[in-house]
């Protein structure tokens, strides 16, 4: 299958990757381009966005790489304006930026708690506030938010701020979906489980396994009912579906991409 997103203009927030390889945002941008979308990809690290653009160019596609800190409203407005300037419209918005810090209420400082909410939830409210009205004017659009199964269940390791902010993201998506349903803007959430992305070695190994990435990767494979973690492409395919017209009747919904993990935790 190809051309599932033909003619659509997409903005992916967090289109780079924290480490070498392919994280969720990079996989989403690459599949969008393969499926015929015109893609703008923003990232805090312009080099990470440019690497995604380079991968897409190697397949004879093109991604407009933009630098932005999505937690800054002015940056969000600037990348939206740049996307409009280049493509004339935004049919798809993906809010992929996010990440966790460990700890519960006693360990997490008030400043770190606020930062987690800025990083995982507040910017999604801001990007939605800016982009959804544009989509309404255009006659429709699709917003896809990237959450985590930590927003559904306690995963055994305490991630209170991440879990709470991702749970908030999921419900924000649902209530926003209802508001915009009559005006053709769909809002859905992809909920990844334990994925084998560069994030695991680059960040989680330190916070969850004393720096031992191999040990953490083995543990995450073993916890997943399929015996293997998923990868960024598994997340990205779900995003392609929700962003495409194939999902024209799907809004306020979630696709859990976790190899059955949450089905085992009640
Ligand atoms: N990897 C997993 O196992 C996993 C599991 C569940 C959910 N998720 C979710 O998937 C999403 C992406 O994860 P990933 O593994 O692709 O991570 P990633 O960190 O590799 O990709 C995200 C990108 O966002 C960029 N970024 C960070 N802060 C930013 C900011 N303030 N403004 C703009 N860009 C910023 C990073 O530079 C990076 O390139 C997150 O929302 C994460 O919570 C990941």
Image (tube, helix red, strand yellow):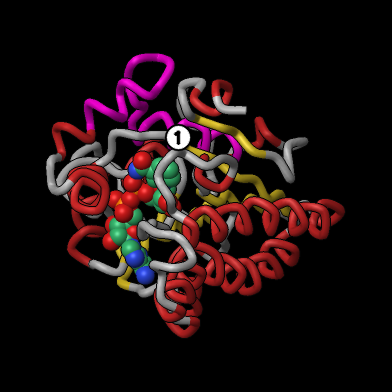
Q: Position of residue 167 (x, y in %)?
A: 61, 53
Q: Residue at x 65, y 72 (%)?
A: 129
Q: Is mark 1 within 8 Å of ligand 1?
A: yes
Q: Position of residue 67 (x, y in %)?
A: 30, 72
Q: Residue at x 50, y 82 (%)?
A: 73
Q: Position of residue 66 (x, y in %)?
A: 32, 68
Q: Which residue is mark 1?
A: 193
Q: Which residues are magenta?
A: 217-242
Name of the residue lying farthest toward the top: 226
Of residues 185 and 8, the one drawn nearer to the viewer in this rendering: 185
Q: Residue at x 73, y 45 (%)?
A: 252
Q: Quadrant of residue 13?
A: bottom left
User: Can you say which quadrant of the picture contains the C terminus?
Assistant: top right
Of residues 130 and 260, the one drawn nearer to the viewer in this rendering: 260
Query: In the displayed structure, does residue 126 sit left or right of residue 198?
Result: right
Query: In the displayed structure, does residue 176 sit left or right of residue 73?
Result: right
């Amino acid at each position: 299958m190809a051309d599932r997103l033909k003619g659509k203009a997409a903005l992916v927030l967090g289109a780079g990757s924290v480490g070498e390889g392919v994280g969720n945002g990079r996989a989403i941008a690459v599949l969008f381009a393969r499926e015929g979308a015109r893609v703008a990809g923003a990232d805090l690290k312009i080099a990470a966005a440019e690497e995604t653009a380079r991968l897409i160019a190697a397949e004879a596609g093109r991604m407009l790489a933009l630098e932005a800190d999505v937690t800054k409203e002015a940056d969000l407005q600037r990348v939206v304006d740049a996307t409009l300037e280049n493509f004339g419209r935004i049919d798809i918005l993906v809010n992929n930026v996010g990440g966790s810090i460990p700890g519960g209420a006693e360990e997490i400082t008030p400043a770190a708690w606020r930062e987690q909410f800025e990083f995982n939830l507040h910017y999604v409210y801001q990007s939605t506030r800016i982009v959804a009205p544009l989509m309404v004017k255009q006659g429709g659009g699709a917003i896809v938010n990237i959450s985590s199964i930590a927003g559904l269940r306690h995963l055994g390791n305490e991630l209170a701020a991440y879990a709470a902010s991702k749970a908030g993201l999921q419900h924000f998506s649902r209530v926003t979906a209802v508001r915009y349903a009559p005006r053709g803007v769909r809002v859905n959430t992809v909920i990844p489980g334990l994925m084998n992305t560069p994030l695991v070695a680059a960040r989680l190994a330190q916070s969850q396994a004393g720096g031992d990435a191999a040990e953490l990767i083995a543990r995450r494979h073993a916890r997943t009912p399929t015996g293997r973690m998923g990868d960024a492409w598994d997340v990205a395919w779900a995003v392609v579906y929700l962003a495409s017209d194939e999902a024209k009747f799907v809004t306020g919904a979630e696709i859990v991409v976790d190899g059955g993990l949450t089905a085992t935790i009640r």
